[in-house]
């Protein structure tokens, strides 16, 4: 069973804490908000220990505690990462401990991944249940968390600026918050409007993945705007063509599991695929390959060619 961070916290405040939790996803903000609110609920009377189990000292420390008579020290929150790499013997010890109920000694397992790929991790999650700490796919959910944080810090932000930040930094909530806090720390102002970040600053923070996201949704105006920003800021044409090529290859062969795309693009592959037919994707891949050859063998104006190509892709020109 999987639940959101918000729902998990509401359950804690209503019914009390459990002895173990499993956080799935690498969004640091969501991980941190869960742990900090859990500590608040426990009135900060619990000592917090961190174990990164790829380090020998942490392995020894954790499993010495598990195997000791007293087990963990009283009133402890143990944050455990990389637990899927422990030995079979220690896996057995850890599983046995997780099955026990001890609400004064809380284990929080964190898996910095988009999905569970390891049998041992799956066994733990079946006991603890899952809390989703992956960056939300839905931009509105990201905005809700950002607004929640800013309200707690008494920071007011212009809605249009928030929309911009979510659109361009939406692959990680912490990055959005850091961008705003950076301005606040420099200017010591807690009211931030869209004029706070100049347009040239904005354009330099647009990345190639923003272009792929717009193309995947066939949003023509956004696609052209993002590409022009990339071009103005010196992003070479050939890497863009190669990323578009790899992007469409991922769409047509999309399966659950490993992807070379970032997590937000990977999570949206199925929705992108609904915007294109298989024949259309194959025609686009051929067109991208031809453009790549053209760029490498001629002195044609790359910007004009790419703009034309993007218009054709978003307008469905290759769907025939």
Image: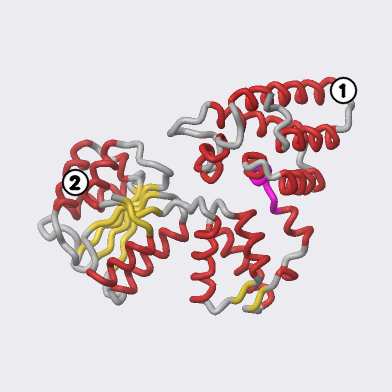
Quadrant into which the C terminus falls: top right
* Mark seen at residue 95: 2
Q: Residue at x 88, y 28 (%)?
A: 300
The answer to which quarter of the image holds residue 279 is: top right
- Residue 45 left/right relative to 28: left
Q: Mark 1 points at which residue?
A: 298
Residue with the most extreme front position: 320
Picture layout, residue 192 above or below residue 258? below
Nearer to us of marks 2 and 1 is 1
Q: Residue at x 62, y 39 (%)?
A: 216
Picture layout, residue 275 above or below residue 28? above
Is tag 2's residue or tag 1's residue first in the polypeptide sequence?
2
Question: Looking at the picture, how far across and down is residue 38, in whole percent?
Answer: 32, 68
The answer to which of 75 and 238 lies nearer the viewer is: 238
- Residue 101 left/right relative to 87: left
The answer to which of 102 and 127 lies nearer the viewer is: 127
Highlighted magenta segment, given as a residue range: 205-211
């Amino acid at each position: 069973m999987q639940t959101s961070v918000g729902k998990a916290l509401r359950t804690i405040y209503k019914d009390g804490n459990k002895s173990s939790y499993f956080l799935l996803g690498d969004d640091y903000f969501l991980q941190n908000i869960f742990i900090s609110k859990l500590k608040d609920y426990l009135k900060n009377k619990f000592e917090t220990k961190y174990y990164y189990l790829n380090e020998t000292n942490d392995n020894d420390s954790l499993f010495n505690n598990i195997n000791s008579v007293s087990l963990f020290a009283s009133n402890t929150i143990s944050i455990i990462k990389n637990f899927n790499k422990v030995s079979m013997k220690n896996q057995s010890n850890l599983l046995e401990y997780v099955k026990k109920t001890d609400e004064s000694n809380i284990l929080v397992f964190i898996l910095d991944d988009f999905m569970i790929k390891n049998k041992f991790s799956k066994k733990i999650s079946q006991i603890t249940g899952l809390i989703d700490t992956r960056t939300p796919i839905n931009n509105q959910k990201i905005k809700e968390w950002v607004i929640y944080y800013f309200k707690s810090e008494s920071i007011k932000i212009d809605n249009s600026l928030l929309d911009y930040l979510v659109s361009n930094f939406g692959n990680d909530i912490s990055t959005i918050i850091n961008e705003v806090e950076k301005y606040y720390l420099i200017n010591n102002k807690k009211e931030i409007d869209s004029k706070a970040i100049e347009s040239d600053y904005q354009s330099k923070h647009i990345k190639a993945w923003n272009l792929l996201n717009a193309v995947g949704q066939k949003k023509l105006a956004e696609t052209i705007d993002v590409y022009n920003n990339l071009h103005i800021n010196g992003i070479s044409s050939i890497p863009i063509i190669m990323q578009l090529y790899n992007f469409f290859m991922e769409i047509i062969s999309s399966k659950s599991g490993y992807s070379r795309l970032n997590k937000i693009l990977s999570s949206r592959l199925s929705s992108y695929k609904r915007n294109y037919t298989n024949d259309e994707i194959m025609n686009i891949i051929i067109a991208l390959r031809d453009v790549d050859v053209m760029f490498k063998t001629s002195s044609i104006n790359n910007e004009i060619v790419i703009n034309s190509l993007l218009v054709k892709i978003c307008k469905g020109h290759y769907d025939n």
